[in-house]
Amino acid sequence: MSDFGEGLGTAIEGGLLGRTLDREKAGEAGEHAHAGPVTCANCQTVFSGNFCPECGQKAHIHRSLAAIGHDIMHGVLHLDGKLWETLPLLTFKPGQLTRRYIAGERAKFVSPMAMFLFTVFAMFAVFQMVGIGAPTDIANDLFGSDGDNPVQTEVRKQMEALEKERATLPAKSPRRSQIDSELKGLNLVFAKAGSPSDAKDKVVSVNTGMPWFDKVLLEKWKKNPGLMLYKLQANGYKFSWLLIPLSVPFLWLMFAWRRQFKAYDHAVFVTYSLSFMSLLFIVMSILSTIPDGGGWAFLLFAIGAPLHLYKQLRNAYGLSRFSAFWRFCALVFCMQIVVLLFVIILGLLGAF
C-alpha cells in the first residue's frame, strides 16, 4: 500500500499537476525575488527589501499594460490609493483629516494642495460637461456706451444736413428761422432718444468714482462684456489657488491669541475646506441636470456647506461649541470679503 502511495505521489509530481505547481512556485519566487539581496536597476546599489535605500526605486519592476495604466493615473492625478483614504474623511470628518495631516500623518492621505488641484480640475471639467459657463451673447452696450443709438444717429444726420443748408442761406432769409426751429426740435428728440423711458431699452451705467479703476476695468467691460466674462471664468480656474492666501490672514486673526496654531495649520484647513466645496459644487451641478434637481442642489448646499465648515472648524482646532460657533459666523462674513477680493483680482487680470 505504501508503494502505491509513493508511486501516486511520484506521478503527481511528474505529471501535469506537478508542472502547474512548479510554475506557480516559480512565479511566486519571481515576484518575491526582491526579498533577498538585489541590485537596483537604477543606481546599481545592492540592497534587501522592497525599495532601494539610495534612490527609492522599487525592487520588483512591473512589465505589464496594467502597470502602464497605473503610471498614467499616477502621472495625471498624483493620488494613487491615498484618494480612497482621504475622501471619506474629507467628506464626513474634515476636522480629523486636517488635524491628523498637520500632526504628521502624510503617507496615508492626499496632500491638501494636490487634493485642491484635483477637485478644482474635476469641478471645471464637470461644469463644461453639464453646460455651466459664462454666456457669450451679452450685448456690448449692457454697461452703457458712449456711441449714439440708431435713433440718435438718424437725428444727427438730419441736424447736420440742416446746418449745412443754413450755412448756404443769406442772413436775412426766412428759411434760416425755420431751420433754427427745426434744429431745436431735433435737439429735444436727440436728448430724449439718449435716455429712453422704456426700462427694457435702458442700459446699466456703472461709475465707481475711481478714475483709474473705471478706465482700466469698467471701460473694457462696457466694450465687450461677453469676452470679459469668459476671461473671468478662465482666470477663475487658473488662479483659483489665490483663494488660499486670501483666506489665511482672516483665519489667523481668529486665532491670533492662540500661539499653538500657526499659519501652516490655517493653510491646511483652508485648502481642505476649499477642496470639499469643489466636490460639493460637482455634486450640485450633476443634481441640477436631473428634472427638479435644482431645489435638491440648493438644499444640499444650504445644509452641507455650513455644517461641513462648522465641523471642520470645531474638530480641527479642538474648540468648544461656543468658540466654534462664533468663529464660524465670523468666517462666513470673511468669506464674502475674500470672494469679493478674488473677483476684483480676476477682473483686473482680465483687463490686461
Image (cartoon, rainbow, N blue to C red):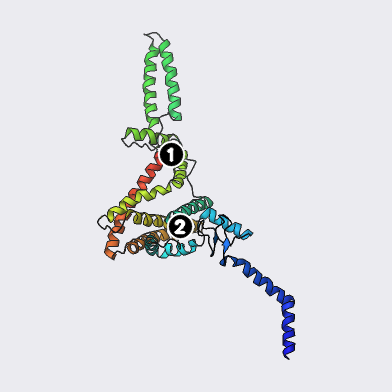
Residue 250, visible in the rendered structure:
yes
User: Is disc 1 placed on a helix, strand or loop?
Assistant: helix
Which residue position is annotated with label 2?
279
Question: Can residue 196 be seen from the camera position used here?
Answer: no
Quadrant for the N terminus in the image: bottom right
Q: Nearer the viewer, residue 134 or 59?
A: 59
Q: Quadrant of residue 343?
A: top left
> How far across and how far down the image is residue 144, in percent?
40, 34
Amino acid type at image mark 1:
Gly
Distance of mark 1 from mark 2, alpha carbons?
A: 26 Å
Residue under the point 65% across and 72% down: 25
Q: Where residue 155 sits in the image (x, y, percent)?
A: 43, 25
Q: Amino acid at mark 2?
A: Leu
- Residue depicted at x 36% and y 22%: 184
Q: Secondary structure at mark 2?
A: helix
Q: Badge 2 local density, few (<14 within 10 Å), some, or many (20+)?
A: many
**First in residue order: circle 1 vs circle 2:** 2
Query: In the figure, is residue 51 to the left or right of 347?
Result: right
**Is 214 above or below relative to 161?**
below
In this rendering, would 244 be left or right of 77? left
Apparent side of residue 64 relative to residue 180 in the rendered image (left or right): right
From the image, which quarter does the C terminus lie in?
Answer: top left
| Place of residue 178 in the rendered image (x, y in percent of width and height, measured from the top left) | 38, 16
Label drawn at residue 350:
1
Count of picture labels:
2
Residue positioned 26% across, 54% down in the render? 256
